[in-house]
Amino acid sequence: MHDLSEGVARFHRDVFPGKADLFARLATTHRPGTLFVGCSDARVVPELITQREPGELFVIRTAGNLVPPHAPGADGVAASVEYAVAVLGVDDIVVCGHSGCGAMTALAEGHDLAALPAVADWLRHVGAVPVTRDVPALVRANVAAQLANLATHPSVARALAARTLTLRGWVFDIPTGTVEQVDVSSPVAGTPVHS
Ligand code: ZN
């Protein structure tokens, strides 16, 4: 068991004092500008790779950065999307895939998921993406597919129609720390987000 309490103590002792004014403000204010949808993968840390402070990103992390298309019934991802768009009024949604994604690798390489029924069921939300053995290509195609899924959510569709919301697709490359933008119309290759 990793001792997280040591980190909590260090945060409170060494980090929090420098951000006390920020947290005092955040105690009564929650106005993030961006909804960041990333993979649950421990190596993809949204606030670190975008250098955002607490309060700036509303984050949903799921296995494979999947957003199921809108459907009737309770869904934690849909509830978070709706809250971010309709209540918090984010003007930007980023779906961020990443290199070496276990979920995309399992699909691309056709891993046997018989012992992981929840994972197998969840990964059907990758949708109509042509399954390729090329993991980077599947990662990009999946980001494009999840942006399309997002657009089926009524709150997102309304904000897109009102031109108050922008959807963007990214892929984070773990070994180089670079972020590529996914061209949704042609998610074959990415372009760098930064120079
Ligand atoms: Zn992943």
Image (cartoon, rainbow, N blue to C red):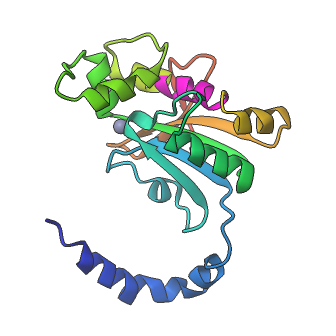
Where residue 24 appears, as percent x and y from the top left, is 61, 85
Residue reaching furthest front? 73
Q: Nearer the viewer, residue 155 or 46?
A: 155
134 w.r.t. 167: above or below: above
Instruction: Determine the residue positioned at 37% across, 89% down.
Output: 13
The answer to whether residue 185 is visible is yes
Instruction: Determine the residue positioned at 19% across, 72% down.
Output: 3
- Left or right position of 36 against 97: right
Residue 7 in magenta stretch: no
Where residue 76 appears, as percent x and y from the top left, is 50, 44
Location of ligand 1 given as a quarter of the image: top left
What segment is highlighted magenta in the picture? 142-151
Where residue 78 appears, as percent x and y from the top left, is 57, 40
Instruction: Determine the residue positioned at 69% across, 64% down.
Output: 31
- Left or right position of 20 against 157: left
Where residue 139 appears, as percent x and y from the top left, is 42, 26
Residue 144 in magenta stretch: yes
Dominant secondary-structure state across the stretch colored magenta? helix
